[in-house]
Amino acid sequence: MTGNPESSVRRACESCRKPGSRDRVSSVENRDEIYDLIHHPQAASSSNGSALTPDSLPRQTHRLGSFVESASRRMNRVSINDEVSISWPSATEARPSPDSLDHAVEEYRRRLYFQPLPLFNPEGLRDRIERFPMFLQWIFLALALSNLPYDSSSAKEADLIHSHARSARDMVLELAMRGTAQLEISQALCLLALGDVLGTHPALFAHHSSNSPAEGRPALALMTIGAASRLELVRGASYSGSPHSPQGDASLRCYWSVFILEKGFAPRFTLLSQTHTKPEYPRSAREPSPPAYLGDEEYAPDLESIRDDLRIDPGITSHAVRAVSFCGDVISYLHALHIGKADNPADTNSNFYQLTNTLYDLESRLGHIHFVRNVGFSERTPEEFERHREYWAPWLLFQITAHATQGLLNHPFIHLVTLRRANRPSQPRLFLQQTVDQAMFHSAWVARLVQTCIDRGLMVYDPLIGDLVAATATIPWLFQYARDAKVSETSKENYRKCIEFLESMPDPSPRSIHKRELLHQLQTMSSQAQDNNMISFQPSKIWQLIDSDIMDAVAPQPTTDGTQAGQSDASKTTVSVQTTFVHPVGERRTDQRQASLGDSMTANIYEGLEQYSLDSIFSQPMFIDHAWLHV
């Protein structure tokens, strides 16, 4: 091996490499050895050794040198199982306690599952986790138990988890950079990326040498998501799994978790959504039985009842994933408007209409079994939500995402401010009326959903839902200054509901705290609105709330007014808040009296006959609950 040029180069660079992370995987010569590490962690931990953490690196220098020297004498080839004994403690010292595993699985189901990633199926997870590679176990424990209080008796266990998770992160990132397209590596990257998005334990998930880890979290999340998506492209090139087998379901959950990370937090830089062939969706949780007292007679007639819906529903998981995908498309569209790349939304060939057609397709695939009116969402108890959390988490993600993205797509700030500032041609009044009506309707639905969560005790931890609620809150914030008193009062109440929900979310991330502060600044800034429904505000603050790609926190892009996206500017916009663009034809009093007389006669003629509600024809059955029509 002396004459091998590759080995000579590797030895020449040895002194320049970081000893802590490089030594763990430097001798991996082929894919089979990496496979041994991932799939046989027990064998990898069988030899004696002590923990190698960042704090213990100086004490291990001499020992590592002796190990490498002895390894070179064994034909210059060291298996990865030999080196793992240096990276990880022995089997008796390295394993987390059963109590920690029990607690972590419980917290994962409560705080992390489908919020927003469906990464691990909670059913049977406690048994499966013991078969995970050690690096995946430590990272899972660190994220699942993050932000939880612990006493002096559990402090030692927490320190052990944190130190091993830091070492595990280094190992996973280096294996990912080597192109190790294995399921467990991708799963670990998903957990690390979610931890960076949440801002969980900067000392744990950020690199330990960073001077200001909190500031670098968006960049770390972006890079980790990018690594995971590329590994999934490699791993899925020849993959064809079934959601009905445990291994196939786990692989599908990992693929779609990476997909959600891309679409939900970095939608402008996606890879998986560009592939022509996508795998199946993972298995969905069964719908909970509806409350016994629910019946169609309590609601206005719809186009069809749940009994008439003969379609085979693919499950709530598929609907939630497709809703997040649509959300990413809308955020990308808003960003294009932000930087001045926009077409005429009233044009039937515009991106706006293409997104609207995508929404119609999203609606047409939803089975009636998932409608609000059929699941009894507002009547469930906290115990029911907890018992069927595997269903309610994706259901709520779907509902809020579907309504919020519709509201943002029709946001009055977009159509009445941004496009006018860009010197776009004035929009038809019918089109503007439609956007205003849709924005008010869907933002009111978001407010009603989050208020129900508060009233019924459903705790929400999902950072994506938090982003969407904060963005949607800008719609009632604007309409609270409308001339119409009823619209103004309703908007004030809906804005309050959104703020109350955001403040009720536990363990807020720095990202969430920043969005709440932006909303507070907007409310303070506009509190001096004039009596003639004129309002003055900084558009940059609106953009920071509705254009929520984490890329803007990493590298803000110039906008049409010369400022950086994601940064505040001093310029202000003055808007007259209007809600009516198509005025009804005024009726004379004599016509009104005749109309009322005709109505009374019609009522007598059709008394006892079957009647149909035209409301259902003009409604959207995907979202409508007729009892909540006038929210």
Image (tube, helix red, strand yellow):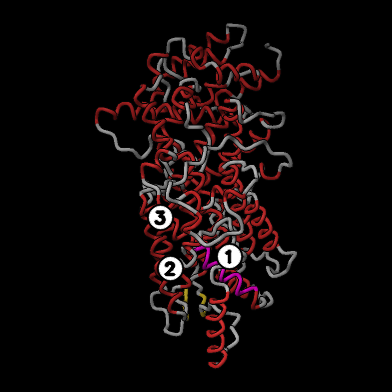
- Residue type, label 3: Thr
Q: Secondary structure at mark 2?
A: helix
Position of residue 365 relative to residue 426, above or below, is above
Towards the viewer: 624 or 141: 624
Q: Which mark is residue 610?
A: 1
Q: Position of residue 200 (x, y in %)?
A: 42, 41
Can residue 101 be seen? yes
- Given this view, does label 3 or label 2 mark the residue nearer the observer? 3
> Could you tell me how far apart the alpha carbons at marks 3 and 2 are, in whole angstroms?
25 Å
Q: Secondary structure at mark 1?
A: loop
Quadrant that contains the N terminus = top right
The question of residue 556 being in magenta is answered with no
Q: Position of residue 35 (x, y in %)?
A: 60, 19
> Could you tell me how far apart the alpha carbons at marks 1 and 2 are, in whole angstroms?
51 Å
Q: Which residue is mark 3?
A: 452
Quadrant that contains the C terminus = bottom left
Position of residue 110 relative to residue 513, above or below, is above
User: Dots 3 and 1: beta carbons under 8 Å?
Assistant: no
Q: Residue at x 52, y 15 (%)?
A: 83
Q: Residue at x 42, y 84 (%)?
A: 531
Sequence-wise, which precedes: disc 1 or disc 2? 2
Q: Which residue is mark 2?
A: 522
Q: Residue at x 50, y 63 (%)?
A: 443
**Extreme-left residue of the structure:** 152
The image quarter in which residue 145 lies:
top left
Sequence-wise, which precedes: disc 3 or disc 1? 3
- Residue type, label 2: Leu
